Amino acid sequence: MDLKKKITYALIVLSVLSILAVSLFKSRQKESVTYSRALMGTIVQVTIMEGPEDRLDSAAEAAFAEIQRLEEILSAYKGSSDVARISKNAGTLIQVSPETIEVLKTAIRVAELSNGAFDPTVGVLGKAWGYSGEKGVVPSREEIGKALALVDYRDVEILEAASTAGLKRKGMSLNLGGVAKGYIVNKAVEGLKREGVTRGIIHAGGDMVVFQKDEKEPFSVGIQHPREKKLLGKALVYNGAVATSGDYERFFEIDGKRFHHILDPRTGFPAEGTESATIVAKDPTLADALSTAVFVMGPQKGMELIERLPDVEGVVVDSEGRVTRSGGFKGEVY
């Protein structure tokens, strides 16, 4: 019997036809102005709420320029990026930017905290699955086994003083997709602040960073329901990041079984037991990596990790739709 295949991509849902047709989209609300641009494989929205009226456009441009600059350094899909060069030169150390060192350090920290549930060396494994399931084909166990042999975050070498980094073994492949976006968005926020913006939001796919000079009132950030077209709840955040990883973002189905893009570096298959994991943290880079780590760890172990970390809260939805939130989570779950 022929296998029925269904491939769904979250990026298509993000108003691609209406927004990708232009390089920059701008809309103004009563008390804010929002700029949108296609970057990092998603739609990045910069919303400015408070700042000098005559510099709003230049502030948004500064934020987008910083995102573009860092994407060229940190994207595994850019042939000249640090990440791509590290993979091409696996087995040796190469000169890289300070930004790459910074992101790698956070990636390794989360890999250690999660006992390998988050691993920046999943690049080879991602290739076996056709990078996030675009092939719509499940690799053979032999293919997965070969890829798994080249996945181990402990084989990442970083010499910060010399600004060099690398992978210990040939054939290994680096992918910082689960951590770089948070870092990049945070740097874009810094760009907005340099232009005089004192309150605003940057939203990029599953990552959102909110900031304000004076903590007058919290931002209310919606949390997407992983199975229905509605909000699961909301997080109240004064300054910081909200990052969500979910099995609904990119996936394909075969005979009713969902194969999503969040791979478990320990098994080689899509992680099971979780539908979505949302992290609220002051550090956007950490939030981004932790959302993936917690998703892969599963509801119980993932929540245990959240509870151990300072300035980190979260909401986890298990494979049965049950919702758990951390003790210090501020907000609502409907």
Image: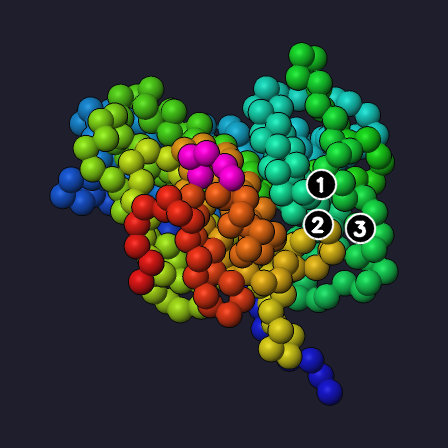
How far apart are the two marked residues, 3 and 2, measured between alpha carbons? 10 Å
Q: Quadrant of the N terminus?
A: bottom right
17 and 224: which one is in front? 224
Q: Position of residue 229 (x, y in %)?
A: 37, 67
- Give, as a single range, the part of the protein colored magenta: 308-312
Q: Sequence order check: which comes first, mark 3 or mark 2?
A: 3
Q: In the rendered image, which residue does mark 3 sit on?
A: 147
Q: Residue at x 58, y 31 (%)?
A: 106
Image position of 329 (left or right of 146): left
Position above or below: 156 against 254: above
**Residue 13 is drawn in which quadrant?**
bottom left
Task: Judge the density around disc 1: few (<14), some (14-19), many (≥20) Cα neighbours within 10 Å.
Answer: many
Hey, which residue is sitting farthest bottom in the picture?
1
* Amino acid type, residue under disc 3 in the picture: Ala
Q: Quadrant of the C terminus?
A: bottom left
Give yes or no for contact between labels 1 and 2 (Cβ–Cβ under 8 Å). yes
* Amino acid type, residue under disc 2 in the picture: Pro
Q: Position of residue 288 (x, y in %)?
A: 50, 41
User: In what element is the residue under mark 2?
Assistant: loop
**Residue 271 is drawn in which quadrant?**
bottom right
